[in-house]
Amino acid sequence: MSNEINSENRSLREELRKLRAVCIFTGGAAHDYNNALTAVMGNISLAKLEVEGNQELMDLLKDAEKAAGRIKSMTERVALFARGIKINKKSGSAGEVVRNALSSAAKDYPGTLKIDIADGLPEVELDPDLINEALVCIIENALEAAPASDGVIEVTVSREDVRNSSKIYGSGVADGDYIKISVKDNGKGFNPDDSALLFDPYFSTKKGREGIGLALAYSTLKRHRGFITAALPQGGGSLFSVFIPLF
């Protein structure tokens, strides 16, 4: 029995070493990639100055700039996930953080955007930058899921008293008052069989996507002593809810 335990411990240590090596490599590669992208984006900006009056070339450069910006944002998320998340909490308004995230992620959204922020919400201890990044990831996920022609994104912010949490949300969730931020889309929803994998690093059902966004959101909420849930609401679509503790 002792030999079996020792063997399991050695295997676990080896897996942890491999995971640490992957994180170090990923973080370093993302940093180098971001440096290269900064140079690319700088050259695109310079090229735009040289093609004023040529709308066709200007449109191509703007498309390239937008694509490079998305890649840069993704590599920053990878780097943040790989090196670990440091929390710098302060008292703030969840509603304000939500508005900032929507302004960043959904500013040019052509569909319907519904926002409902409850009155009289107390301030909450959070890292506004990290929560903003987590919400951007969730909102971008909803934007991609919603249909292009008649997409509807609903964002609500409320206060929720969580009780019997282990029965409702699973183990590890503390009872108490939370600020709840929900993002609902009217897309096709996700496969229920994938629900346990949605927040795993690099899992994605979208071809060519890395799947780091929801994993980063999950880790950010964990570091805030909060949690995130995914559901398939009646009427279709997906519903992701973020819970930030008020205690």
Image (cartoon, rainbow, N blue to C red):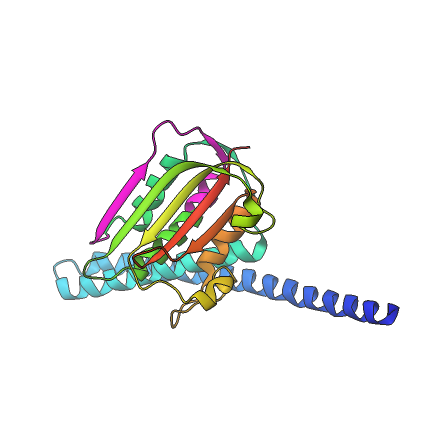
Q: Height in image: 231 above or below 155?
A: below
Q: Is residue 112 magenta?
A: yes
Residue 48, quarter of picture: bottom left
Q: Between residues 171 and 133, which one lies in front from this camera angle?
A: 171
Circle count: 0
Q: Between residues 228 and 220, which one lies in front from this camera angle?
A: 228
- The answer to whether 178 appears left or right of 116 in the picture is right
Region of the chain picked out in magenta, as a range: 109-132
Q: Is residue 88 magenta?
A: no
Q: Between residues 128 and 50, which one lies in front from this camera angle?
A: 128
Looking at the image, the residue that sits furthest to the right is: 2
Residue 146, given in percent of the width and then of the height, sits at 28, 59
Residue 4, given in percent of the width and then of the height, sits at 82, 71
- The answer to whether 36 appears left or right of 67 in the picture is right
Q: Residue at x 58, y 55 (%)?
A: 83
Residue 96, given in percent of the width and then of the height, sits at 36, 35
Q: Quadrant of the N terminus?
A: bottom right
Q: Height in image: 213 above or below 191?
A: above
Q: Height in image: 215 above or below 182?
A: below
Q: Residue at x 40, y 53 (%)?
A: 137
Q: Height in image: 40 above or below 124?
A: below
- The answer to whether 159 appears left or right of 13 in the picture is left
Residue 209, given in percent of the width and then of the height, sits at 40, 68
Q: Residue at x 51, y 47 (%)?
A: 227
Q: Quadrant of the C terminus?
A: top right
